[in-house]
Image (cartoon, coloured by chain):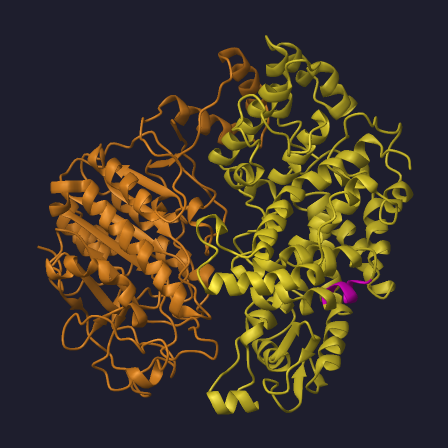
Chain colours: A yellow, B orange
Amino acid sequence: MDAPSLIEDIRFGFGPLAGRPPSKGGLDPDRLLAQLTAPDPAAAAWDRPDLATRAPLIAIYQEDHKNGLIKQGAKLAAPESRQLIQIEEDDMTAYAARPAVALTPFRERLVNFWCNRITVAANSNAVRRVIQSYRDEAVRPNIGGRLADLLKATLWHPAKLFYLTQNTSTGPNSPIGLKRGKGLNENLAREFLELHTMGHGYTQADVTELARLLAGMKNDADGPRVEDGRAEPGVKHILGVAYHPGKDEIDRLVEDVAHRPETAQATAFFMARHFIADQPPDDLVAAIAKACTDNDTQLVPMYRAMLTHLLAAGERQKLRSPLELVVASLRLTGMTGTEQNLRGFKKEGMRLPDRLRTMGQPIEQPARPDGWPDVADGWLTPPMVAARTDWAVDLARAVGDRSDPVALADFALGGLAKPMLPRAVGGAEQRWEGLAVLLASPDFSRR
Amino acid sequence: MDLLLSRRSFLIGCSVAASPLLTPVTFAAAPSENRLVVIILRGAMDGLDVVRPVGDAAYAGLRPTLAADPGPALNDFFTLHPAAADLLPLWQAKELGFAHAVATPYRNGRSHFIGQDALENGTDSGDGTLTSAHDGWLNRAIGLIKGVTPDTAVSVSQQRLLVLEGANETDHWYPVTESPLSDQGRQLIAALNAADPLFAEPFAEATKLENSASGMEGGVPSGKMQYAQLGTYVAQRLMGPSRIASFSFNGWDMHRDQKQAMANQLKGLSDAILAIKTGLGRAWGTTLVIGITEFGRTARENGTGGTDHGTGGMAVLAGGALKGGQVFGKWPGLGDSDLFENRDLLPTADVRSYPALALRAMFGVQAHGLESTVFPGLDLGSDPGFLL
């Protein structure tokens, strides 16, 4: 597989990878789209255990947790519990390490984009147990398929059901609702229409009816289904269409909503905003939305509509998020983030989860159900800028002693750099400080 | 570990529940021995769960699971949530009180985002429309306090604290780590950042603050004791030139499993208040802490062991300046016909009157300024007599 060109690497990836010089030339949509299906052994080395593998460990862990055995380093816990703890620590490591080594960085960017567009946050232990599976089993396999299928997979994933408290929402007229006085909450119903799909064009009545339709959703070892005991009986009218209780009807609802023009428009807007510009132009959004509507919500035509727009190869307008900045600097310096005994860092290494937190992007913990800000202002408070600078300085100090910072600046940005950048990088007194100047430059933060 | 100080007026941003690690602390200095701490309780605190009207005949029926364990009695009508028991000694010392059934004028929506903006802006609008300057009421109040020194200062987190933003300069603080870069390396980085339209301002502000590092010990608050640490920082600032401090305390939005969530929150809030008291020492005697929230929650539990967005809420009051040991305000009742829109506690007082009266009593802000500039449309009305 050819290496991406510089602009492909920077805008649709995480910047060039050490030892893999960018291909010559500009943006080639076919080369980028080929990344969706190309093998990537480097990234695959960071594949994480799936939910089926984790499930038995989770069961034992939860038992240990209930018995107070997880405290104090889990020394008294079962080996399975300790294994799960290790797996989840490694999940955190892989969050940056996988994109740091990936040969198909566009694929990794798309996974991150969709995980954020249809946000799940590890705000409880229940979500924390399954959030890696959300990424790997609900989002990743569907980024090259249809939006409707991606929405179904994410809606039904246990992480989503836990995160938006759908797992306990109960039809007030269901058997359990009547017997135990349980009821609905509208959390998932509202966010599905507001944040994951349409954004506008529905009413409070649609939300309420959808909450009634979704009541009883469950997904565990027995698979996705609507529990009879919690399902709200009767027909629900949502956006003018009648739905009966049951899983198939929920899937039909998702299919219908995915095909709405509001959904195409909103999805196109957020895609364009993520990859191209904080305020994407209308014609770009319209082109992506049209590709969605014309192609049964197929995502690849939407990506192609974006990649063939003039702005796809235009001036860099976006700011790298903290994760993108960290990964770009790891790729440039040939690191994975797992290295230990680095000068200036604590013995155990870079502690990227802490770094990302101070930069404003704690791993898998966006503050709100609409996800990370995805615009420059969201990452640029003074303490965040200070944290970005600190990262640049600390990484450069650890690995930059023998680097050639001017050559690295050329490798990272080539002709895209502002004229003053190579001068500033070359003007540093020491090699590592030159690298720090490069990594802390606004130029390096742009994509 | 040094502190990086930075100052920034945020015009964008959002403010619902986030990691408490990212909680901003904002300070303003004023020449008085009185001290005021304003806590923004984000997410809509359930006042009916914190201070429980067990004397109201309807209460037990509305809260069958949440109120199962009533907690220690405050008086013959109210009990305190068991997880807030650490605060009982303050109540007994008359240094803790609550204002029940209070609300901002925002009544038409129950949106966190609009509600919090309205709370911090101080608007009189029923639909939450902000006053024209889009600034914070505490910032406007500072402009009316005599002898204020606008400190060069520090904004400290991704979240804005609208309540202190505006035309009058205020300080923001938060700890960060220091850098090993040489002066020359710094200058090169500074030059590149200064030349960039996006980075110029926040970079310059971060740097300015770094140059005025404070020597506060302890680092970034984290872990179980983070709220105590936060309270300690607030107290340390108030023992310096600052007299008014504000911070936000997130995480009060509890649509499900409120029992545990509320217990955790109240532990943190108790830690913060007690750390402020400890840190202030004798100065606690002339201090008032006010915790305010964007609105209350439904009188009834919902179907998932939580509560949904409501209207009438509660303010938490603490400090030696308080005439405490009382629950202030007119109790509206919890019967079906008493509830606002048959679901929420009916507000019987404007929550803005509590900080307004405190600003008058503690910092000499005149009634006219309070009713026109700080809280437009507010009727100060009769003072419930909550301050010594």
Residue A314 seen in this snapshot: no
Which residue: 50% across, 46% down? B12
Q: In which quarter of the image is residue B280?
A: top left
Residue drawn at point x = 87 percent, y = 63 percent: A295
Q: Quadrant of residue A51?
A: bottom right
> Is A65 in front, or is A263?
A65
Viewer-closest of B24 and B220:
B220
Q: In this view, does A265 lie to the left or right of A119?
A: right
Residue B170 x %, y %: 33, 37
Number of callouts in the render? 0
Looking at the rendered image, the quarter that the C terminus of chain A falls into is top right
Q: Nearer the viewer, residue B385 or B253?
A: B253
Give coordinates of residue B294: x percent, y percent.
37, 62
- Please name the residue shown 38% across and 71% down the image: B297
Most common secondary structure along the magenta stretch: helix
Asked whether the viewer can see residue B45, the reply is: yes
Q: Where is residue B359 in the image (x, y as percent from the top left)?
A: 19, 50
Among all residues in the image, which is located at the extreme left?
B388
* Vertical relation: B273 (above or below) A322: below
Residue span colored magenta: A146-151
Q: Quadrant of residue B151?
A: top left
Q: In this view, does B148 lie to the left or right of A164?
A: left
Quadrant in the picture for the N terminus of chain A: top right
Drawn side of residue B73 relative to residue A305, left or right: left
Image position of A389 (left or right of B166): right
Check the image and report above or below for B122 versus B258: above
In magenta stretch: residue B355: no
Look at the picture and state if B273 lies above or below B126.
above
Q: Nearer the viewer, residue B45 or B191?
A: B45
